[in-house]
Amino acid sequence: MQFDLTSLTEHRKPLHPLWFRMTHWINALAVLIMIMSGWRIYNASPLLDFTFPRSITLGGWLGGALQWHFAGMWLFVLNGLLYLIFSLVTGRTSRRLFPVSARGILNDTRLAFTGRLTHSDPGRYNQVQRAAYLFAILDLVILVLSGLVLWKSVQFPLLRDLLGGYEAARWIHFLSMAVIAAFAIIHIAMAVLVPKTLLTMISGRSQPRRPAGHTSS
Ligand code: HEM
């Protein structure tokens, strides 16, 4: 494999700062705990005509699952707040996730489907990634807000009314869980398909460039 001088310089430049990698991986763990314990809580009083297999739930029984859910909740919310604060202070996320436009998303989707979406600059997310990440962050915020209504319904009457009442909040919580689970499946598949992004997310360093012609999303 051949490296040019630019790729060697890029190789030394940290692409993802430590705070970003730490909050990302803690978030992944917290989301896993929240989803698996949430499925066990759901099973005790299902909204739909199905329950989740016991083997992929966490907590063993309703009481245990609630304890996992509340413990995971603190990890998830405090870590999420750290991510948002660091992002705002450093401007990193706004630099990487914006600008994003409908035209840009359509254009990059078209390029992805024709195999022409390049990853020549690993320091930049393409428009589809930006939209997906912003959507995931928004979905996580909705999960927290609807979760607050389910947890402390009486203490958050305004939020409860804004979400359409307790029952509606339950549906919103369930549907936003389904959205983040679908996001996670696609997100992990993409990380496996483009392993250099995964390595960068672990080490923080950008990976040496592949020869021209390599495509990914
Ligand atoms: C469900 C839990 C997860 C959520 C909500 C999530 C969310 C995100 C978000 C929002 C970003 C971009 C953030 C930014 O730049 O400010 C990101 C980046 C990334 N995530 Fe995740 N993530 C999750 C789990 C995972 C897992 C399990 C993996 C690995 C298997 C992974 C691999 C990556 C990689 C490699 C990037 C950087 C992509 C790139 O540089 O092209 N994530 N994730």
Image: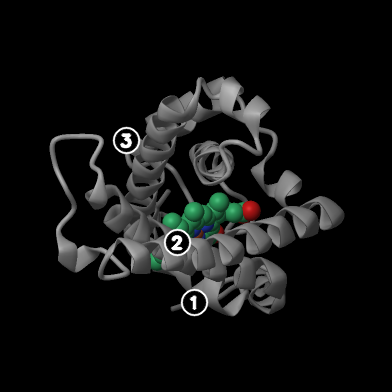
- State the scheme by which the image is colored: one colour
Q: Nearer the viewer, residue 19 or 7?
A: 19
Quadrant where the N terminus sits is: bottom left
Q: Residue at x 18, y 53 (%)?
A: 52
Residues at discs 1 and 2 in contact (Cβ within 8 Å): no
Q: Is residue 65 above or below residue 153?
A: below
Which residue does the numbered mark 2 point to in the structure image?
69
Residues at discs 3 and 2 in contact (Cβ within 8 Å): no
Which residue does the numbered mark 3 point to in the structure image?
114
Q: Quadrant of residue 160?
A: top right
- Position in image of residue 9 (x %, y %): 70, 75
The residue type indicated by label 1 comes to Gln
Q: Residues within 10 Å of mark 1 (few under 14, many from 20)?
A: few
Q: How far separated are the C-alphas under marks 3 and 2?
A: 42 Å
* Nearer the camera: disc 1 or disc 2: 2
Mark found first going from the N terminus, 3 or 2? 2
**Outermost residue toward the front in this view:** 154
Q: Is mark 2 within 8 Å of ligand 1?
A: no
Q: Residue at x 33, y 45 (%)?
A: 182
Residue 24 appears anywhere in the view? no
Q: Is residue 119 left or right of residue 5?
A: left
Task: Say what secondary structure mark 1 lies in.
Answer: loop
Mark found first going from the N terminus, 1 or 3? 1
The residue type indicated by label 3 comes to Thr
Q: Quadrant of residue 50?
A: top left
Which residue does the numbered mark 1 point to in the structure image?
2
